[in-house]
């Protein structure tokens, strides 16, 4: 509850001009997950430095029931426990936001002990928000793994599950689930050092996690742009790319 | 004959005069009593004779329904039985029946075409042919009616007995409203050549709009526009977004990225002419190092030659101002203001509203569900925009369609500007937050519709889609037929004052190409519904090619359309009725004419309205009474010595 009050005090303003991309965390009253403002700001810096995306350096927190969620087509939902059931109003609010074009990224931060309970709760969460849809493994050939960087698998601060999972809405992954504590891999302290160690792969694994986060942001902005024929043809012919599953 | 008709009255007057003269003579010669007796007897005999002679004028009319046998629609058969004939026809006449012989008619019953055909793409034209005769071959000709009949397809079809479809593959070679005719070639075996032609109109649009979409950086505006383009049927999209900038930190090798080089030469020199439309979204035109003057000049040439460009704003777009120093400045509809103390790119909360020109422009209007004219987009209650490019002076050929203002300033900033330059068209949308209209807070709100309509209207108008013309032309009667006047409605998008006039020209083209065309032109007054109505004279099977223009207060609108005039079609029952009526048109009584028979054809029956006649000629009572009267008069005259 203290977290929520703090969040409401911290920042509910929309991001700047129309081009600026604000990164925000959706806040559920029933969630005990801490606010990851610093992680989101670290991610914004990485996106700014590595890509042409005009990311807002300020992090934002958005209560699920707030109309401000429509300022942010991309929202993160860090979780350190099973996702609790949503109220009817919260379900409706998030379902409308997803249907209109929002993208929600669930980031599991609880390690291996509560993972199974989290996974089961996510199934329920998905069923409530997108009736009839199922959580599915995102294929390695999906554009999510090559929207900016070419990646082979999912990673994070931990390496618990090397796949991402997602829910398709209107031919796009409207919900993406990571089990490897992605945001912690990019979070820096005020002094500029990384806040958490990355295990077991160290800095190489951290770099891959940051790249995956960058890919997720670019995917939310460009969708299947890198699936366009002109791009794939070039990459396959000039760089000898082969997508997973291709000879 | 009607008893009150002039001949009947003349005959009656003559008879009465004769009777008066006869009565006066009798009374003078035989005295009052005897003269009156003789006059009464002769008058009674005369009245009785008149009743017998004039009886058809006294009969009632009754309706008889005759069901047509199934075989009738394949061949003509005997439909009246003998006892039915006795009941139906006047007794003094004998009516020949249609002979029992099979019909050999081949008729073009209908032509089925898609609601919209695509430019240079094959579409199916299905001619519905009804063959009443045996299996045979026939030639089918498809012709384009554009000032004259131009044969496009001629093919031989094998017809089976009965109804069937013959498919023709048509590839339209021009965009717009087009008129076509399908004809069955005349054959000596065909018993009726009047039903061998069918005329239809076809709307031809570009099937797949090839769109080049370049963006300076990924953003929500880019994402929602891409979503719109990829989800719109008939668009073929080639996209290039700048995902990195020169100063970006790059802890990666080229091989680790999925980026590819921006193929400027290929896109802007080699392939540009193959695109129907270019979208330049928040792109640093004028400063991007890979786009040299050579590429920008080609872009200008592309517009002058008929291409379309949609400029979409943003923090890197027009505000850079450098574009004003490039050749591209020639084809932008408003000056892209350079950054100054106030900034060329403004952040804040901006509310959009339609400018006067926006009320009537195809980009910012749409066809209402209950209105035949165009309605302006409803921009009220939309989410506010958060970033706007400050545009400078609007070009002489540009029109401001939408403006934006914020609470902090009363200034109305041009937001959407459109115009035609050379043969091409350009639209500039000076914001990068139009996505907020595509991502509304509630499902029940309608901003996504406004977002879709504004951008799709822009795209279709830039690509010169015929449906985006300033005026629409439609026939009031859905299926005009030959020989009847055709009423045409010419409607404009947006506002028109009642009493203002549109100039309408129409040219009729004969379906067979044998008759010379007819032209007419007229100024028609616009009504409250923003439509003017023109009545075209009766014509044969063919097409009216209609052009309309409207000008008022500097507003110039035009449009064109096609109204197909179809041959008059006649059902089999109507054909039978037409054949029977002359046979019934006979006179049976010396001093009168029969009341006309009426034969009303139904889908599978005939309704015959026939005078019911009760004959008096062969009635012995009437004959005996008449004989008695005349005998009594003769006996009295003999006894009284007046013979």
Image (spheres, coloured by chain):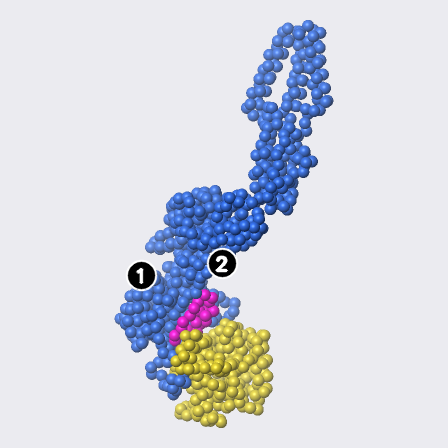
Chain colours: A yellow, B blue
Mark 1: give few (<14), some (14-19) or many (20+) Cα within 10 Å: some
At which x and y percent is residue B368? 47, 58
Callout 1: SS: loop
The residue segment tinted magenta is B222-241
- Give above or below for A186 relative to A168: below
Quarter of the figure with residue A241? bottom left
Q: Is residue B220 visible?
A: no
Task: Tell me the number on the disc at residue B124.
Answer: 2
- Give above or below for B107 relative to A212: above
Q: CA distance from mark 1 to mark 2?
A: 36 Å
Between B164 and B312, the one lying in front of the other is B164
At which x and y percent is residue B280? 36, 70
Query: Is residue B332 in the magenta section?
Result: no
Callout 2: SS: strand
- Give above or below for B390 relative to B97: below
Between A14 and B560, the one lying in front of the other is B560
**Which residue carries the number 1 mark?**
B422
Between B231 and B103, the one lying in front of the other is B103
């Amino acid at each position: 509850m203290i977290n929520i009050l703090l969040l409401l005090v911290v920042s509910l303003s929309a991001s700047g001009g129309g081009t600026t991309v604000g990164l925000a965390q959706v806040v559920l009253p029933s969630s005990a997950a801490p606010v990851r403002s610093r992680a989101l700001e670290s991610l914004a810096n990485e996106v700014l430095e590595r890509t042409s995306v005009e990311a807002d350096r300020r992090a934002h927190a958005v209560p699920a029931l707030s109309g401000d969620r429509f300022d942010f087509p991309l929202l993160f939902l860090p979780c350190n426990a099973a996702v609790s059931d949503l109220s009817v109003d919260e379900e409706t609010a998030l379902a409308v936001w997803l249907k209109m074009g929002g993208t929600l990224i669930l980031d599991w931060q609880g390690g291996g002990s509560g993972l199974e309970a989290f996974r089961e709760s996510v199934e329920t969460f998905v069923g409530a928000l997108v009736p009839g849809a199922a959580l599915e493994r995102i294929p390695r050939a999906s554009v999510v793994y090559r929207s900016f960087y070419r990646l082979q698998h999912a990673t994070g601060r931990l390496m618990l599950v090397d796949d991402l999972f997602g829910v398709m809405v209107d031919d796009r992954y409207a919900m993406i689930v990571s089990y490897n504590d992605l945001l912690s891999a990019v979070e820096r302290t005020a002094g500029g050092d990384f806040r958490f160690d990355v295990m077991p792969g160290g800095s190489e694994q951290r770099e891959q996690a940051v790249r995956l986060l960058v890919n997720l942001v670019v995917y939310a902005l460009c969708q299947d742009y890198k699936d366009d024929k002109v791009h794939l043809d070039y990459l396959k012919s000039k760089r000898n790319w082969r997508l997973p599953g291709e000879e | 004959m009607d008893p009150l008709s002039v001949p009947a009255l003349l005959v009656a007057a003559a008879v009465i005069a004769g009777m008066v003269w006869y009565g006066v003579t009798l009374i003078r010669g035989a005295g009052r009593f005897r003269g009156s007796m003789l006059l009464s007897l002769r008058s009674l005999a005369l009245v009785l004779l008149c009743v017998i002679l004039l009886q058809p004028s006294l009969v009632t009319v009754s309706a008889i329904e005759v069901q047509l046998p199934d075989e009738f629609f394949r061949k003509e058969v005997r439909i009246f039985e003998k006892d039915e004939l006795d009941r139906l026809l006047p007794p003094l006449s004998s009516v020949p029946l249609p002979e029992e012989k099979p019909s050999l008619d081949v008729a073009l019953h209908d032509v089925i075409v898609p609601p919209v055909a695509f430019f240079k793409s094959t579409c199916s034209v299905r001619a519905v042919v009804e063959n009443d005769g045996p299996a045979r071959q026939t030639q089918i000709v498809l012709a384009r009616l554009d000032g004259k009949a131009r044969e496009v397809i001629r093919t031989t079809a094998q017809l089976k007995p009965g109804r069937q479809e013959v498919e023709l593959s048509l590839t339209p070679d021009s965009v717009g409203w087009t008129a076509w005719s399908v004809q069955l070639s005349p054959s000596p075996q065909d018993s009726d050549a009047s039903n061998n032609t069918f005329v239809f109109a076809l709307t031809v649009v570009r099937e797949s709009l090839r769109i080049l979409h370049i963006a300076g950086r990924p953003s929500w505006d880019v994402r929602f526009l891409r979503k719109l383009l990829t989800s719109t049927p008939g668009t073929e999209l080639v996209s290039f977004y700048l995902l990195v900038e020169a100063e970006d930190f790059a802890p990666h090798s080229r091989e680790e990225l999925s980026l590819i080089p921006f193929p400027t030469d290929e896109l802007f020199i080699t392939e540009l002419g193959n695109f129907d439309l270019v979208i330049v979204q928040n792109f640093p035109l004028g400063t991007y190092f890979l786009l040299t003057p050579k590429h920008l000049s080609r872009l200008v040439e592309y517009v002058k030659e008929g291409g379309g460009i949609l400029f979409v704003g943003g923090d890197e777009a027009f505000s850079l101002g450098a574009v004003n120093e490039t050749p591209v400045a020639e084809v932008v509809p408003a000056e892209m203001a350079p950054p100054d103390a106030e900034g060329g790119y403004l952040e804040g909360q901006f509310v959009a509203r339609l400018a006067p020109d926006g009320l009537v422009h195809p980009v910012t209007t749409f066809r209402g569900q209950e209105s035949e004219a165009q309605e302006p987009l409803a921009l009220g209650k939309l989410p506010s925009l958060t970033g706007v490019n400050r545009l400078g002076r609007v070009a002489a050929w540009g029109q401001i369609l939408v403006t934006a203002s914020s609470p902090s300033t009363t200034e109305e900033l041009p937001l959407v500007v459109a115009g035609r330059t050379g043969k091409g068209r350009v639209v500039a949308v000076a914001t990068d937050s139009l996505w907020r209209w595509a991502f509304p807070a509630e499902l029940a709100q309608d901003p996504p519709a406004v977002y879709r309509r504004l951008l799709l209207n822009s795209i279709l108008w830039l690509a010169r889609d015929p449906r985006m013309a300033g005026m629409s032309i439609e026939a009031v009667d859905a299926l005009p037929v030959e020989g009847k006047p055709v009423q045409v409605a010419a409607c404009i998008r947006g506002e028109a004052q009642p009493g203002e006039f549109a100039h309408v020209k129409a040219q009729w083209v004969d379906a067979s190409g044998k008759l010379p065309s007819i032209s007419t032109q007229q100024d028609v007054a616009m009504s409250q519904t923003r439509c003017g109505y023109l009545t075209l004279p009766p014509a044969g099977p063919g097409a009216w090619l209609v052009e309309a223009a409207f000008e008022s207060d500097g507003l110039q609108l035009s449009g064109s359309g096609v109204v197909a005039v179809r041959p008059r079609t006649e059902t089999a029952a109507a054909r039978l009725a037409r054949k029977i009526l002359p046979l019934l048109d006979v006179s049976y009584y010396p001093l009168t004419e029969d009341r006309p028979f009426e034969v009303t054809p139904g889908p599978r029956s005939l309704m015959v309205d026939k005078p019911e006649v009760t004959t008096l000629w062969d009635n012995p009572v009437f004959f005996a009474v008449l004989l008695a009267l005349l005998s009594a008069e003769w006996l009295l005259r003999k006894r009284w010595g007046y013979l």
